[in-house]
Amino acid sequence: KPINVGSQINTSGYEAFPCLSPDNKRLFFVKEITNKLINDEPCYRIMMSEKGRDGQWRPAIELPAPVNVSSEKAPRIMADGKTLIYQSSQYGIFVNAGRKVPQIDSDGKSTKILDEFEMNFFGIFEVKLHPSGEWTAPQSIEPINKYADIQAPVMGGPSVSYDGNTLFFFA
């Protein structure tokens, strides 16, 4: 049976992509930052809440830079409890998707078909937590982001197998 984790995490705003640390003491998730846009899109931040000794979740905090510097989503903490992978638009990666897309005019009718377009996409990145509590600089996960740059944007957030050896995503 689902258990509500409480108002420290569940607010009237948008929260999504929950991920528990292997020891079940830290909860990572994404929260929409209201009234903030990045490239005309909603802005999301990776949040973390720690479970107290009393079993209750503490107020969530926004992970500091270099993690939250643009719009982030889909955090996944690895089995080592120190490696975090997530999607980010922080590097402003644009993809020439090479698809046929209708261009819509102001009255909602398609006026012509475009052969190519560019779009901002969320690449997949990795950071590691130092014992000092600081995160390393984000590293692009290749060849996924390189493939996406050539073929199609990574659209779905990363998911990792329990042993940490397989990364799943969809493009």
Image (cartoon, rainbow, N blue to C red):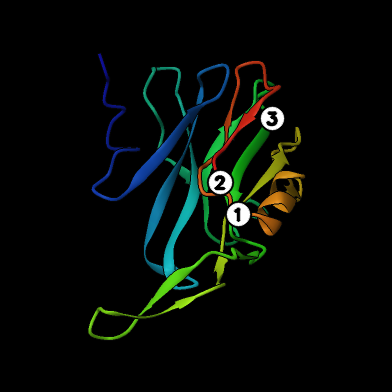
Rendered image: mark on residue 134: none
Quadrant position of the N terminus in the picture: top left
In this rendering, the answer to whether 119 lies above or below 67 is: below
Q: Residue 8: tell me if it is visible.
A: yes
Instruction: Give SS at disc 2.
Output: loop
Question: Any mark on residue 82, and which?
Answer: 3
Spatial CA distance of label 3 from label 2 is 26 Å
Residue at 56% over, 16% down: 23
Left or right of 64 in this view: 147? right
From the image, state whether disc 3 or disc 2 is nearer to you: 2
* Residues tagged 3 and 2 counted as in contact (Cβ below 8 A): no
Q: Are marks 2 and 1 in contact (CB under 8 Å)?
A: yes
> Quarter-wise, where is residue 97 in the image?
bottom right
Q: Secondary structure at mark 1?
A: loop
Residue indicated by mark 1: 152
- For the view shown, which residue lies furthest in the top direction? 1
Residue 135 in view in this figure: no
Q: Which residue is mark 2?
A: 171
